[in-house]
Amino acid sequence: MLASAPTGGESKLMGTRLVLLIEVLGGAISHSLALLSDAGHMLTDVVALGLAWLALRQSTKPADLRHTYGHHRFGILAAMLNGGLLVAIVIVIVYEAVQRLLHPEPVQAGLVVVTALVAIAVNAYLASSLSTPAANLNVRAARLHVLSDLAGSIGVVVAGGVILVSGWLAADALIALAIAALIAWGAGRLVTETVHILLEGAPRGVELTTVRTRIEGTPGVDSVHDLHVWMLAPEQVALSCHVVVPEARLSDGEHLVRELEASLCDEFGVGHTTIQLEACHPCEGETDHALGQHTHPHPPVARTG
């Protein structure tokens, strides 16, 4: 898939640029705000697809001395920028739609319908070509752009049909507002998810209490503390923790860590694990553990997976 990404990305960009040009010309000639709104969204699609393609190439670069986790977050940055572009286009569309409602302009509805039908055909192809079972966040962001454009183009056809039948010019501005609402909904979800990842939030569906219970339920584990689970990218989950074990188990620490790594990967999708083993001494007392206080009279055993 990675080898074919450049060719596929370039073809999608060419298709999007073609629709953008058609909609800009059609919107300018027909004076349709709904069509121009769809064209404005197509402009962000050009950027979105370009960023998705670039981020996909960058994310495959191996880790180096300055980027020890690799380059997976290029996709997150691309998705965040896509979300910002969507928000900006929503503001412009809403402003222009309000102006059109206050000061209606004649619209060539027939040209609007024909242009939107062409856009629907191209967007349907682009959406299907971007559909993959395990698309990463920036590819999903690009597909979101295309899907919302597809829905927007359908709305433009509806607006053109209403104007053709009834002459109600407000339909054009109202459909433009509907497109803006659709874009805003998608942008909100996208920005929320990217911010969650950038803030090193836990993956959706992974409860920290469940992870803790699983670790502490492993034979030979006394307790766990300083447990952290976060995402480098949606498909890259990392975990670090301190595992307290009886001192007698430290000699078998390598086997225990491997067992924990395997279970965490299978059950929670954790691909990068850092586990530090600590000896539990009977003389420490239960009060220290209840308060979360841990002493290290002997050097801990650590392993990174």
Image: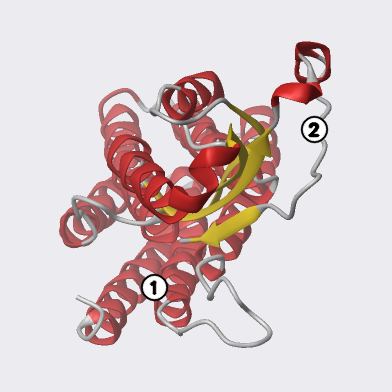
Q: Please, what is the three-letter code of the amino acid marked with disc 1? A: Leu
Structural distance between the alpha carbons of marks 1 and 2: 65 Å
Is 232 rendered above or below residue 87?
Answer: below
Q: Quadrant of residue 73?
A: bottom right
Q: Residue at x 34, y 76 (%)?
A: 13
Residue 33 in percent (x, y) is at 51, 46
Q: Residue at x 54, y 19 (%)?
A: 209
Q: Please, what is the three-letter code of the amino acid marked with disc 2? A: His
Q: Residue at x 49, y 52 (%)?
A: 251
Q: Foreground: 182 or 193?
A: 193
The mark found on residue 21 in the picture is 1
Q: Foreground: 105 or 75?
A: 75
> Would you name the residue on which mark 2 appears?
294
Q: Earlier in the sequence, mark 1 or mark 2?
A: 1
Looking at the figure, which quarter contains the N terminus?
bottom left
Residue 226 in percent (x, y) is at 70, 36
- The mark total stands at 2
